[in-house]
Image (cartoon, rainbow, N blue to C red):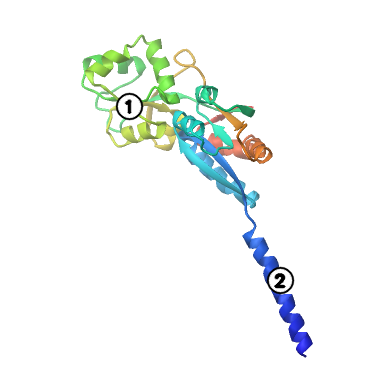
Amino acid sequence: MKKIISLIIIFASICATLCSCSVDKEKEELYIFAASSLTDCLSEIEDIYEAENPDIDLIFNFNSSGTLREQIDEGAQCDVFISASSTPLEKLDCASRYKIDLLENKATLVVSESNPAKIQSFEDLFNKLYNTEILLGIGNTDVPIGEYTLQIFDYYNIDVSKLNEKGVITYGSSAKEITSQVKEDLVDCAIIYETDAKIADLEIVEIADKGQCSKIIYPSSVLDISNNFDLSVAFLDFLQTSYAKMIFKKYGFTPID
């Protein structure tokens, strides 16, 4: 009887050890740095991907692409960088080992809910900025949405310095920040991404075409500083599946085949 009890205790101990090893098994961590405009759709994709890959933990850092580039150059751990333009990627100190163009977005002119100035288009906006007391929210020049906004200004031959002197422009450090400004009626209008406008349920009065600014492409790259190259490539490959594309489309992005 004592032998049987001893065997049971030994067996239970082995089972407990095995279970403990299974529970304590560390997950592979992937560090994903992504433009703030991707927050909603990638957060949804995160839940799905981790459910299908329980041994992988996706750790996201959402911010303006310019800020993310600075963080990477300062030594932040990053496996995958998804930028809102090619400029931050090109300025990185490290190189890309695997790169794809993932998504397309558009720049839009949106207005506050009341739209007291009755702004109807980009041209109408710029005429009123010079002649009336309205406030426009745009991105800083070191973030992609600010970069695209300056292209729109150039198209209409707008002197930004004169508008700054008039005090009719306010700046934001990310697309999300600018979206919040117009959503909270802190500005009369703003130039933001189409996806952010749709998520915030803002009125779009004009969408910039290819003549007004360049295509807004989101390049995605596995960096050469990554400690998990194969897993990072697998994650980017997942972002190109029909299921992931369906989620991107839901938030207003156009997947690139």
In the displayed orientation, state which residue is furthest to the bottom: 1
Apparent side of residue 3 relative to residue 77 in the rendered image (left or right) = right
Residue picked out by circle 2: 15
**In the picture shown, does residue 24 fall above or below 108?**
below
Amino acid type for the residue under numbered disc 1: Tyr
Amino acid type for the residue under numbered disc 2: Cys
Residue at 27% from the left image edge and 33% from the top image edge? 186
| Local SS, label 1 | strand
Q: List x then y, in percent, for residue 3.
A: 78, 86
| Local SS, label 2 | helix
**Residue closer to the observer: 97 or 65:** 97
**Residue closer to the observer: 10 or 161:** 10
Residue picked out by circle 1: 171
Where residue 78 sits, quadrant-wise, is: top right
Q: Find out whether the residues at labels 2 and 1 contact each other: C-beta distance under 8 Å.
A: no
Precedes in sequence: disc 2 or disc 1: 2
Mark 1 residue crowding within 10 angstroms, few (<14) / some (14–19) / many (20+): some
**In the picture shown, does residue 20 fall above or below 65?**
below
Q: List x then y, in percent, for residue 254.
A: 55, 29
Residue at 65% from the left image edge and 49% from the top image edge? 53
Apparent side of residue 253 relative to residue 12 in the rendered image (left or right) = left
Residue 127 in sight here: no
Mark 2 residue crowding within 10 angstroms, few (<14) / some (14–19) / many (20+): few
Give the alpha-carbon distance from disc 2 to disc 1, as whole Å: 60 Å
Q: Point out the image quarter for the N terminus.
A: bottom right
**In the picture shown, does residue 113 fall above or below 153?**
below
